[in-house]
Image: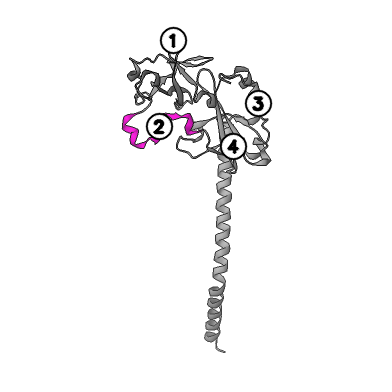
Amino acid sequence: MSRTRKKTAVLAISIMAGFYLTPTFAQENNNQANEQEQNSSSEKQAQSTSAQKKQGNVRPIGEWNYQKLYQSGGIRADRLLDANVLSDSGDEIGSVENAILNQDNRIIALIAQVGGMWDIGDTHVAIPWEKVALTDNGVQVPIREDNVDDYGLFDESYVIKQDLDQATQVEDDVMTGPQTWKVTDLLNDYASIDDGEGYGYVSNALFSKQGVLQALVIDPSEKRYGKGPYAYPFYGYEQGWHPGSSSYQISYSSEEAKQLPTFDYTKYRSLWN
């Protein structure tokens, strides 16, 4: 066989081999690329969480102690919602429907339904937190029949009117702008841990008597995490959470989550138990 024919034959065999082998090689390369991409994404997430912890943005789980919560006590969100609203004279005039918080995770106002006893129909109002007095029987407020219109829901301290188109609608057609959020935006959300695994759901929130969100109470749905409930520090906007989120991500790994003791409600001194 001539040298030219040999070259042609070799070239033909090479092309045929490439035709049959290339799809396999391509699939393997794609699998490797996907695996590398997934590993890279996981590494980046782990590095991000690790960096946040090193910077002090996330308190190490070993330093999170329930004793301060037990000693200071405060307000349970499930007790605050539906708490009685009382007038200056102590008469019951309505009930608490929601709480508006700012980006510092502090209550700035309560949303209440009042007015039934005044024959004006049920009216929703926003009561500034600084005007609320906490009592054993409920929250006492300065609202009267003749000044109820002064406590409208759409005060610009809570709702920026030009942002209403971007706001999130909640119960009773009450809406808040992006600079504030409601405690019901968080309650009953799904919860996951920082490696993306499903964990449980947010069952409660704990506030200091000054209205600062102290912790979230989460009930695990996965048996390997125990029965719970467990109370976790809440970082909110600081860790990328926003009111439109359908789930809440705990800033700890699955191994760290297993270190947390069960939260004992009986040791938490709360109003309206």
Crowding near the residue tagged with mark 2, few <14, some 14–19, many ≥20 C-alpha atoms within 10 Å: few
x%, y% of residue 129? 44, 18
Viewer-nearest of discs 2 and 3: 2
Q: Residue at x 40, y 36 (%)?
A: 168
- SS state under label 3: loop
| Residue kind at label 3, given as amino acid type | Asp
| Residue kind at label 4, given as amino acid type | Ser
Q: For the residues marked 2 and 4, what is the alpha-carbon distance in whole angstroms?
A: 41 Å
x%, y% of residue 94? 43, 21
Q: For the residues marked 1 and 3, what is the alpha-carbon distance in whole angstroms?
A: 36 Å
- SS state under label 4: helix
| Residue kind at label 1, given as amino acid type | Ser
Crowding near the residue tagged with mark 3, few <14, some 14–19, many ≥20 C-alpha atoms within 10 Å: few
Please check the rendered image and state whether residue 169 is part of the magenta-colored stretch, yes or no.
yes
Q: For the residues marked 1 and 2, what is the alpha-carbon distance in whole angstroms?
A: 28 Å
Q: For the residues marked 4 and 1, what is the alpha-carbon distance in whole angstroms?
A: 54 Å
Q: Earlier in the sequence, mark 4 or mark 1?
A: 4
Can I make out residue 118 in this image?
A: yes
Q: For the residues marked 2 and 3, what is the alpha-carbon distance in whole angstroms?
A: 33 Å
Residue holding disc 2: 172
**Is residue 206 left or right of 143 when viewed as pictured?**
right
Please check the rendered image and state whether residue 214 is part of the magenta-colored stretch, yes or no.
no
Residue holding disc 3: 264
Residue holding disc 1: 89
**Is residue 98 left or right of 154 when viewed as pictured?**
right
Can I make out residue 250 in this image?
A: no
Q: Residue at x 58, y 45 (%)?
A: 43
**Part of the protein shown in magenta:** 160-186
Crowding near the residue tagged with mark 4, few <14, some 14–19, many ≥20 C-alpha atoms within 10 Å: some
Q: For the residues marked 4 and 3, what is the alpha-carbon distance in whole angstroms?
A: 30 Å
Mark sitting on residue 50:
4
